[in-house]
Amino acid sequence: MKTKHRATCLFIYENSILLIKMQDPISKIIYWYPPGGKIEQNETAVETVKREVREETGFELQLLNEDYVITEYEMLLQNMRCYYRI
């Protein structure tokens, strides 16, 4: 199976977390996930997060610092395997 790399960002404000709502077109199952997406060729994880946040929410992301956590995870979801590591 080919590995795909993603970058995501978790926005926490007071007691709220920003999540994107998506419905699977086939199963009609609704998923909630943090903004993010596939890291394109020659793109850093930070660049990916900025682009994906803009595409998914319309927000322009400005990083106040570069503290971040790299997480890898593994899960199998409709023929997709994801790897988690914190």
Image (cartoon, rainbow, N blue to C red):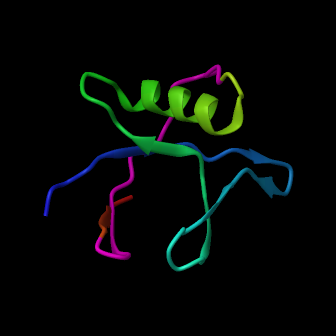
Asked if residue 21 is positioned above or below residue 40 in the image, the reply reads below
Image quadrant in which the C terminus is located:
bottom left
Residue 51, position in %: x, y? Answer: 52, 27
The quarter of the picture where residue 72 lies is: bottom left
Residue 3, position in %: x, y? Answer: 19, 54
Seen from this angle, which residue lies furthest right? Answer: 14
Q: Is residue 44 left or right of residue 10?
A: left
**Image point 51% across, 43% down: which residue?**
36
**Image point 36% across, 76% down: which residue?**
78
Image quadrant in which the N terminus is located:
bottom left
Q: Does the magenta stretch include residue 68?
A: yes
Q: In this view, does 80 lie to the left or right of 53?
A: left
The quarter of the picture where residue 76 lies is: bottom left
Number of on-image labels:
0
Residue 6 in sight here: yes
| Prevalent SS, magenta region | loop
Q: What stretch is highlighted in magenta?
A: 61-79
**Image point 50% across, 33% down: which residue?**
49
- The residue closer to the viewer here, 3 or 24, is 24
Q: Is residue 50 magenta?
A: no
Seen from this angle, which residue lies furthest front? Answer: 26
Residue 16, position in %: x, y? Answer: 82, 55
Residue 84 in sight here: no
**Image point 44% across, 31% down: which residue?**
48
Asked if residue 29 is positioned above or below residue 34 in the image, the reply reads below
Asked if residue 69 is positioned above or below residue 46 in the image, the reply reads below
- The residue closer to the viewer here, 14 or 35, is 35
